[in-house]
Amino acid sequence: DPAAKLAEPDAQALARAYTQALHAARAAGYSDCTPGRFILPGELEGSPVLTFAPLPPGPYPRGALGREFERRFEAYKREVAKPF
């Protein structure tokens, strides 16, 4: 439930599942698997900036999983994608 209160173990499990899905898509021959740092995380492995997954659009309340994932995705774009 994206509106549920954020629990970091749940966030990490969702991010792992999303990463596995990206790896499976790449193994199946898809080449545009984004965000690419999920496949090759390098020094960012395990960091909050790579601990998110796509969720249905919200608005989500403060402290909700969906709201935190939105924040983390914005941080990913600002700190990882844009400088690239």
Image (tube, rainbow, N blue to C red):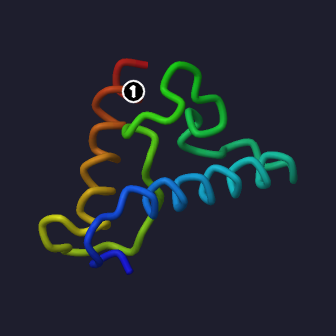
Q: Circle 1: is it few (<14), some (14-19), or many (20+) Cα within 10 Å?
A: some
Q: Residue at x 34, y 47 (%)?
A: 73
Decide: is 28 above or below 49.
Answer: below
Count how many numbered circles sit on residues in the image: 1
Q: Is residue 73 left or right of residue 39?
A: left
Q: Residue at x 35, y 18 (%)?
A: 83
Rendered-image quadrant of the C terminus? top left
Q: Is residue 61 left or right of residue 1?
A: left
Kind of element beneath mark 1 = helix
Q: Position of residue 74 (x, y in %)?
A: 28, 44
Decide: is 11 above or below 26.
Answer: below
Q: Choose between 11 and 84: the one closer to the eye.
A: 11
Q: Which residue is mark 1?
A: 80
Rendered-image quadrant of the N terminus? bottom left
Figure quadrant of residue 34: top right
Figure quadrant of residue 57: bottom left
- Looking at the rendered structure, the kind of residue marked 1 is Val
Q: Position of residue 17 (x, y in %)?
A: 62, 59
Figure quadrant of residue 66: bottom left
Q: Residue at x 74, y 42 (%)?
A: 31
Q: Position of residue 13 (x, y in %)?
A: 54, 59
Decide: is 68 above or below 74.
Answer: below
Q: Position of residue 44 (x, y in %)?
A: 48, 26
Q: Residue at x 43, y 52 (%)?
A: 52
- Residue extending farthest right: 28
Decide: is 78 above or below 63.
Answer: above
- Residue extending farthest left: 62
